[in-house]
Image: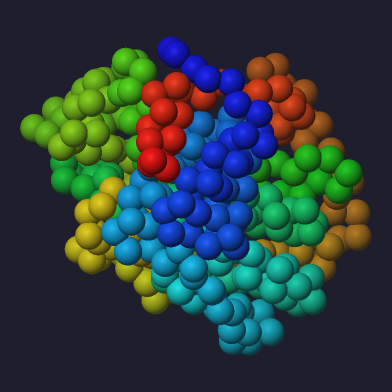
């Protein structure tokens, strides 16, 4: 694969310049560029610069407001609602996460319901931000239909990711971010770009047949939920929490209202924060460290998020797909 080395600052600046030249103001460009840069920093390539052309498309079409100013409402001491003003999700997180963290610290639990945002980034940054406050975080969001429920061959669910973070005072938190699909669509698209097959069970072609060809899945095919009926049930839960419960679009409704520009649709997000210091015993952290020691003492086991946290320790340039870099630069011509 032909790559171009870019420092983290260069990745941020490339994203920021591209966004501001295509209609984003400084605050929105900064929030999204930081999200893109941290994804590349941690090795989450499918959620880094790879997403930028789609973000630009949604700015150019006018679907997403480049000067969005999200507003927060403290509905109850434990419930925060944020109207994202039809902007990208990271700028709404900047408004809502601090209020959510404060609620959970004071009450033991807090809920953040976000509406009118466009979310296509990695899902771990918001829960990791909560873990930095020594809070447990859980987040989920729907998307547009790309996944067939168990037993079906037509899409209804989004890839419907779910992320979770557990704080470890003085150490990196345990964090996972996973699609309820067998594979995130971004990973399928990268496999198609680079000419790699995907595992059997990832998805179906347009005729409903199993395939390992990522192009056949991405072009008229459909993803499958992980674990059959189990993953399908979790994907349904995400729809209900992040659409039904927050009063936003289900994945099929998001598609019906989307303009087809290739960017993320309007939707919502559900985020839950919990304080183990208030809910558990006084020695909650030591108790859980004993559990993690048992877990990692098993041969072949590593904690979720370890690879990303190791990646971020390096300040070396990241190798970015050269055609992607050229495409992004062309969007600023």
Give the camera-side residue of 253 and 261.
Answer: 261
Q: Residue at x 23, y 66 (%)?
A: 257
User: As drawn, is 310 to the left or to the right of 76?
Assistant: right
Give the camera-side residue of 32 and 135.
Answer: 32
Q: Residue at x 49, y 37 (%)?
A: 49
| Image quarter of the C terminus | top left
User: As drawn, is 210 to the left or to the right of 144?
Assistant: left
Residue projecting furthest to the front: 333
- Residue 44 appears at what percent x and percent y? 55, 33
Q: Does the image show residue 186?
A: no
Relative to 3, say whether 55 is above or below. Answer: below
Give the camera-side residue of 150 and 178.
Answer: 178
Q: Residue at x 65, y 29 (%)?
A: 7
Relative to 240, say whether 214 is above or below. Answer: above
Give the camera-side residue of 293 and 78.
Answer: 78
- Residue 224 appears at what percent x and percent y? 29, 38
Q: Residue at x 69, y 74 (%)?
A: 99
Relative to 122, say whether 27 is above or below. Answer: below
User: As drawn, is 116 to the left or to the right of 33?
Assistant: left
Residue projecting furthest to the left: 207
| Image quarter of the N terminus | top left
Q: Does the image show residue 277?
A: yes
Model colouring: rainbow
């Amino acid at each position: 694969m032909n790559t171009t080395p870019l420092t983290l600052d260069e990745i941020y600046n490339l994203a920021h310049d591209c966004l501001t030249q295509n209609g984003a103001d400084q605050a929105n460009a900064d929030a999204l560029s930081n999200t893109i840069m941290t994804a590349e920093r941690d090795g989450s390539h499918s959620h880094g610069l790879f997403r930028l052309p789609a973000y630009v498309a949604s700015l150019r079409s006018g679907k997403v407001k480049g000067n969005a100013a999200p507003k927060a409402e403290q509905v109850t001491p434990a419930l925060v609602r944020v109207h994202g003003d039809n902007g990208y999700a990271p700028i709404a997180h900047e408004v809502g996460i601090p209020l959510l963290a404060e609620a959970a610290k004071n009450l033991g639990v807090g809920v953040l319901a976000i509406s009118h945002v466009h979310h296509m980034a990695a899902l771990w940054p918001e829960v990791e931000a909560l873990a930095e406050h020594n809070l447990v975080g859980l987040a989920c969001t729907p998307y547009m239909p790309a996944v067939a429920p168990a037993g079906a061959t037509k899409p209804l669910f989004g890839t419907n990711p779910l992320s979770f973070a557990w704080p470890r005072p003085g150490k990196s938190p345990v964090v996972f971010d996973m699609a309820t699909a067998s594979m995130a669509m971004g990973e399928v698209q990268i496999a198609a770009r680079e000419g790699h097959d995907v595992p059997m069970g990832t998805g179906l072609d347009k005729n409903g047949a199993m395939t390992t060809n990522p192009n056949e899945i991405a072009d008229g095919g459909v993803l499958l939920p992980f674990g059959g009926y189990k993953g399908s049930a979790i994907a349904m839960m995400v729809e209900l929490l992040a659409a039904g419960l927050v009063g936003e679009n289900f994945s099929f409704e998001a598609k019906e209202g989307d303009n087809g520009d290739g960017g993320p649709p309007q939707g919502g997000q559900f985020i839950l924060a919990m304080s183990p210091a208030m809910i558990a015993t006084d020695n909650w952290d030591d108790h859980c460290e004993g559990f993690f020691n048992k877990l990692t003492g098993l041969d072949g086991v590593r904690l979720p998020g370890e690879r990303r946290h190791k990646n971020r320790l390096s300040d070396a340039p990241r190798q970015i797909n050269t055609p992607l870099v050229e495409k992004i630069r062309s969007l600023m011509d």
